[in-house]
Image (spheres, helix red, strand yellow):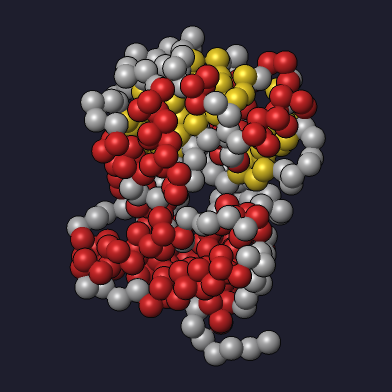
Amino acid sequence: MASETSTVAIAGAGSIGCYVGGCLALAGRKVVFLGSGRVVEAMRESGLRVSDLDGRDRLVEARAISATDDPAAALPGADVILVTVKSGATGEMAGLIGAHGRPDAVVVSLQNGVDNADRLRAALPGRRVLTGMVMFNVVQSPDGEAPLRAHRASQGEVMIDDGADGLVDLLDVDGLAVEARTDMKAVQWSKLLMNLNNALVALSDLPLARQLADRSWRVVLAAEIDEALAAMKAAGIAPARITGLPPALLPKVLRLPDWLFGLLARRMLAIDPQARSSMWDDLKRGRPTEIDELQGAVIRLARRTGAPTPVNERVTALVRQAEAAKRGPPGLRPEVVGGGPRSA
């Protein structure tokens, strides 16, 4: 049973981990950050700045931060372990939790995609592993900026499996709204539909708000979502309603003219003007992306059901090319990404 005195380990001090952990620390929760040496050093030296789209801008003082790159120091004392690493590091983190985490610690996956919680459960038999989903975008400050900043750049909450006593009360703090759900698998698939845009932001090299305001890009996203919905329907998967719109209506709304889309999708467009996607940041930093967990999940599901996915496959191939080139986001035009005629 979790309580407000429980110790929370942030297993992956990246953008999401720093924001979530920072909000918890500011609320007086006991938090230990497990991250890379660069991030740990930055927090130890200058603290952690936590800001959001609603106007909050707060600082966790360096002296109040417990941060380490040593799992043997971070995990043994944790009552709750929030896994916030990228999907590619899930297996490694599961091994660290298995080696150093308490058997009775509650493990919560706060990761993109639909398979990470299942991977953690498979790797941690007998342990309590919950599915979670972060519904907002977080931007981390550029390397060298001090203090390190985690900025929530869009609206949204954290959703987690219902049934863990006291967990929502522990995690639901100022700046971090947390909701318990009984349909987290459906929530994951619904969030995946919107996360298909992460790759388009990365390929366009445009801020998220600007990219979403352009119908040419929304048409590509709508085509991706159409393919995903067809594959999900064939597999008997019903995505949850997590925004104001039923998932089935998303492609229709995305294809509306810009002026009408702007009127009907105010919540979707309530985004910091400089916000991008984590996949954009990965390409910028020359890191592997989560394309296999997003478009890849759609493609794998479609292959099992016989549904076609030409747009998701093309987007995946273009992201793979950008990963291999290591020249950052390529700045492609929507007709190139969507498979239309090439133009300058």
Query: Residue extending furthest top?
Result: 5
Image quadrant where residue 268 sits: bottom right
> Please, is residue 183 above or below residue 22 in the view?
below
Query: Which percent across, then down, holds residue 137?
Result: 57, 46
Q: Residue at x 37, y 69 (%)?
A: 226
Image quadrant where residue 40 sits: top right
Front in this rendered view, residue 158 or 326: 326
Q: Residue at x 52, y 19 (%)?
A: 73
Front in this rendered view, residue 196 or 81: 81
Is residue 219 visible in the rendered structure shown here? no
Q: Is residue 281 left or right of residue 125?
A: right
Quadrant of the rendering where the C terminus is positioned? bottom right
> Please, is residue 14 above or below residue 40 in the view?
below
Query: Which percent across, then down, holds residue 195?
Result: 47, 56
Query: Which percent across, then down, holds residue 192?
Result: 41, 54
Q: Residue at x 26, y 73 (%)?
A: 307
Query: Which percent across, then down, holds residue 29?
Result: 55, 16
Front in this rendered view, residue 196 or 216: 196
Image quadrant where residue 3 sits: top left
Is residue 312 visible in the rendered structure shown here? yes
Q: Is residue 68 left or right of residue 230?
A: right
Q: Is residue 121 left or right of residue 18?
A: left
Quadrant of the rendering where the N terminus is positioned? top left
> Please, is residue 75 above or below residue 84 in the view?
above
Q: Residue at x 32, y 17 (%)?
A: 104
Counting labels gives: 0
Q: Is residue 242 left or right of residue 199?
A: left
> Please, is residue 27 above or below residue 148 in the view?
above
